[in-house]
């Protein structure tokens, strides 16, 4: 995977969306950055993206309100939804 400080979505690997954020994992900053990153990529308000599980883990479950599975898969082919 590429290295660097910029927040980015790297794509889908084995059905999982891979993303990198530069915010440190302190006081939820990295989770907030991830939510903003996903919301921006989907052109949604951050309030429509929610962390369901994994707040303190590298692997997280994210919920996006108002988008169906087909729309998410069209944005990120291969994504398990």
Image (cartoon, grey):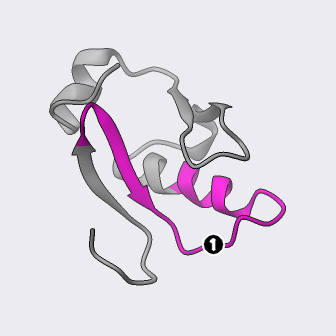
Q: What percent of the width, then of the height, locates residue 73? A: 22, 27
For the point 26% across and 30% down, the residue is: 79
The N terminus - image quarter: bottom left
In this picture, residue 11 sits left or right of residue 20: left
In this picture, residue 59 sits left or right of residue 23: left
Q: What percent of the width, then of the height, locates residue 42? A: 36, 43
The vertical placement of 30 against 52, above or below, is below
The vertical placement of 80 against 10, above or below, is above
In this picture, residue 30 sits left or right of residue 26: left
In this picture, residue 47 sits left or right of residue 70: right
Residue at the far bottom: name it. 4
Q: Which residue is mark 1?
A: 23
Magenta residues? Answer: 13-36
For the point 46% across and 20% down, the residue is: 66
Is residue 72 found inside the magenta-colored segment of the image? Answer: no
Give whichever of 63, 5 is nearer the camera: 5
Is residue 14 found inside the magenta-colored segment of the image? Answer: yes
The C terminus - image quarter: top left
Dot 1 lies on which element? loop
The vertical placement of 20 against 74, above or below, is below
For the point 84% across and 61% down, the residue is: 27
Specify the quadrant of the image occupied by residue 59.
top right
């Amino acid at each position: 995977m590429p290295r660097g400080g910029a927040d980015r979505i790297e794509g889908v690997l084995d059905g999982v969306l891979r993303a990198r954020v530069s915010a440190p994992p302190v006081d939820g900053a990295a989770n907030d950055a991830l939510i903003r990153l996903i919301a921006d990529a989907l052109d949604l308000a951050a309030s429509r993206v929610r962390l369901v599980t994994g707040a303190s883990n590298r692997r997280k479950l994210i919920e996006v309100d108002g988008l169906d599975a087909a729309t998410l898969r069209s944005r990120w082919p291969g994504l398990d939804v």
